[in-house]
Image: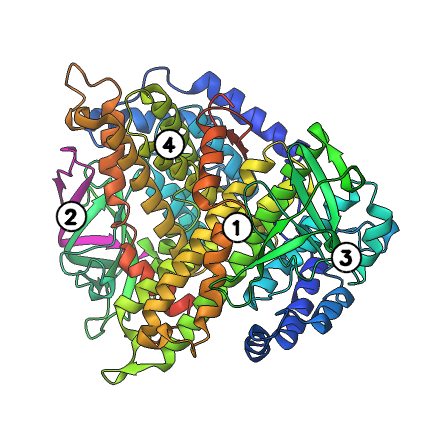
Amino acid sequence: MEFRFTEDQLTFHASLRKALEKECTVAHLRALWATETGRSPERWAKLAELGLLGLLVPGEHGGLGMNEVDLVLLLEETGRVALPEPVIETAAVGAPLLAATKLAEEWLPKVAVGEAIVTFGHPLNPFVTDAHVADLLLLPHGDELHAVPRVQVALQHEPCSDASRRLFRVNWTPKAATRVAQGTDAQRLLAAALDRAALACAAQQLGIGQQMLDLGVRYATERQQFGKPIGSFQAVKHLLANVAVRIEFARPVVYRAAFSVAHETAARAVDVSHAKVAASEAAVLAAKTVHQVHGAMGYTWECDLHIWMKRAWALEAAWGTSAWHRARVAAAVIDGRGPAATFGYSAPGA
Amino acid sequence: MDLTYTAEEQAFRQEVRAWLEAHVPKTPLKSFDTRAGFQQHREWERSLNTGRWSAVNWPVEYGGRGVTLLQWLIFEEEYYRAGAPGRVNQNGIFLLGPTLMEFGTPEQKARYLPRMASGEEVWAQGWSEPNAGSDMAAIRATARKDGDHYVINGQKTWCSRGAFADWLFGIFRTDPNSERHHGLTFILVPLDAPGVTVRPIAQLDGETGFAEVFFDDARVPVENRLGPENQGWKVAMATAGFERGLMLRSPARYQNTARKLVEFYRAHADTADPCLRDAVARAWLNAESYTLNTYWTVSRLMSGGSIGAEASLNKIFWSELDLHMHETALALLGPRAELTRAAPDAGNIGDWLDGFLFALAGPIYAGTNEIQRNVIAERLLKLPKG
């Protein structure tokens, strides 16, 4: 038993963090809001170069052949900088899903080098993110899974509160030629994709929550009222301390879920739901709290805080709300439908 | 990252499990906050010590097994799973023991640790005073050096286990001209010394879980001092770190409560308010979060890390988790929640009610959660001091 990251993983994490802070500044984020796609092809190429996009792509298809434990810290950093590009859909979900299909050889080398963007739809969510820039859409239809080139779909744009998000309703017609799996195979792939997406969201929520906490601490240290920094007041201290508690206790939950996904453990679904609930709740609490700490300044468009607040709300609702994931845990733990085990313990009768 | 147990860890678990199955008392002991229960628990500590399970993570030379922190977690999981009695000497074994190992002389370690491990000497803590609770540096009880003795005067209060314990550890003002956390000394006091008066205080459940202790020219030898004179604050802070951090509250306690809560909900699912299902799921998840955080910390400590102000995060989390779980259980009981053990319809209500009352103390003892939030804000988040 060793619940920690390796030196290599931590080094990769540190270098990606440095690169993202340079590649994904607030000024650039704001500049992209007004553009037609809202996306930066240059940054996407850079993400590929850094190894992020091909991290889960097997070595024989030009990727790094690593797993979700290697990926989780990196996704956390993409949350910290509020990266708008679809790394969850392409790198965390699309790549491993394609790897399990006949399309692996054709598409994965392109994913790894940043030449293909993949996005993904799920029965839990009527909207598909980044469909406008995707080359390939992985879409469920009944008990089938299809891989559809963008030229074969019609998109209806659904504007979002988070100006970086790009959501679409996708209209398309299933054909035999686009079907990549059906029956239990398709269900298995969709279940794995949902768990990977929820894990990736949870990792980003950790980074988002941490970023907001840092912003709140900085503001409370600088902003003076009654002749003192507001962070010296106990009422403000306690608000921020509560956020720190929730984030620190979500952290190992997310990392354990990454292990469970990487090793396909029996309790994977429950562990992922736990991660999504813990990280989303921490990020949403951070949003509410740090907004309060900022006073009226936090209510302005000019203040950067809303970049992360809106992302936190968006991800709370994406890939299963916290309520949906808690219900999935309850079904396993209370009703005994599915394994729910922890170190040395397990749910009664599970 | 490897979240599977090694063969050695699994073998250790089996060894613990087998021993506990053979030795845990079949009928529950009385509360250790009663005189008779205290005696029963002292005997249980002795029994544990015969198997060298009393202080399992202590080094072998002090009576432990020198196991890793991870094995200690495994031990605790098995201990709660087996339904073994609460630890009457936890003040000694989990708080003073590690402090003695860090600051004690070889003579002190030899004198105190074995008798602590065997339950022969049960320890009370003497932190708070009537005017020094959360403001612990406001301590006024004095210890004046007189030859080879300290002469102690003043009062301590809220001394857990104080009503029936043998010894008390605490800090006393040895420099009369000092202020705040300077000029304090950590001293070990036998509660049967002349000049020491113990007055039990009934707590919320009616039992005497704590006491106030009065010192009237009580004399203790200078060799009862732990650490240097006037450096008691540093020693006490180390003890408080153990208290808030890992040792006092292993996750097994909460895993076990969460498990019982799930069983309890299942038994009442037909009549329970549907919103309590979500509360039960939350309780189970948070107990899991606490477990994972502990394993995460233990892995860090085992590879050379240390724990500091992070202990305050821990203390807030376990105390609020415990209270939430017991509130959920009482909500499940509905109108029966107000019954005591003695009521004909009580069933196992008494356990939940006792647990609830004990949980209510959690956000207060070991440093109130408000103090912990200040520590987090100032030491972890680096917010300016007030």
Residue flagged by tag 2: what amino acid is it? Val
- In the picture, residue A237 is in which quadrant? bottom left
Q: Nearer the viewer, residue A209 or A314?
A: A314
Residue placed under numbered mark 1 in the picture: A318
Depth-wise, is mark 1 or mark 4 nearer the camera?
1
- In the picture, residue A141 is in which quadrant? top right
Horizontal and vertical percent for residue A168?
58, 56
Pointer 3 chain: A
* Above/below status of B288 relative to A156: above
Residue placed under numbered mark 2 in the picture: B213
Please indicate whether residue A49 sits to the left or right of residue B356 in the image.
right
Please indicate whether residue A148 sits to the left or right of residue B57 in the image.
right
Q: Which mark is residue A54?
A: 3
Q: Are marks 2 and 1 in contact (CB under 8 Å)?
A: no
Q: Are marks 1 and 4 in contact (CB under 8 Å)?
A: no
Pointer 1 chain: A
Report whether mark 1 lies on the same chain as mark 4. no
For the question of whether residue B135 can be seen, the reply is yes
Residue flagged by tag 3: what amino acid is it? Gly
Magenta residues, as a range? B198-223
Circle 2 SS class: strand
**Does residue A107 show up magenta in the picture?**
no
Q: Residues within 10 Å of mark 4 (few under 14, many from 20)?
A: many
Horizontal and vertical percent for residue B238?
39, 58
Task: Please name the residue shown 54% across and 76% down the image.
Answer: A30
Depth-wise, is mark 3 or mark 1 nearer the camera?
1
Task: Please name the residue shown 50% across and 33% down the image.
Answer: B75
For the question of whether residue B103 can be seen, the reply is no
Residue flagged by tag 1: what amino acid is it? Ala
Horizontal and vertical percent for residue A331?
47, 29
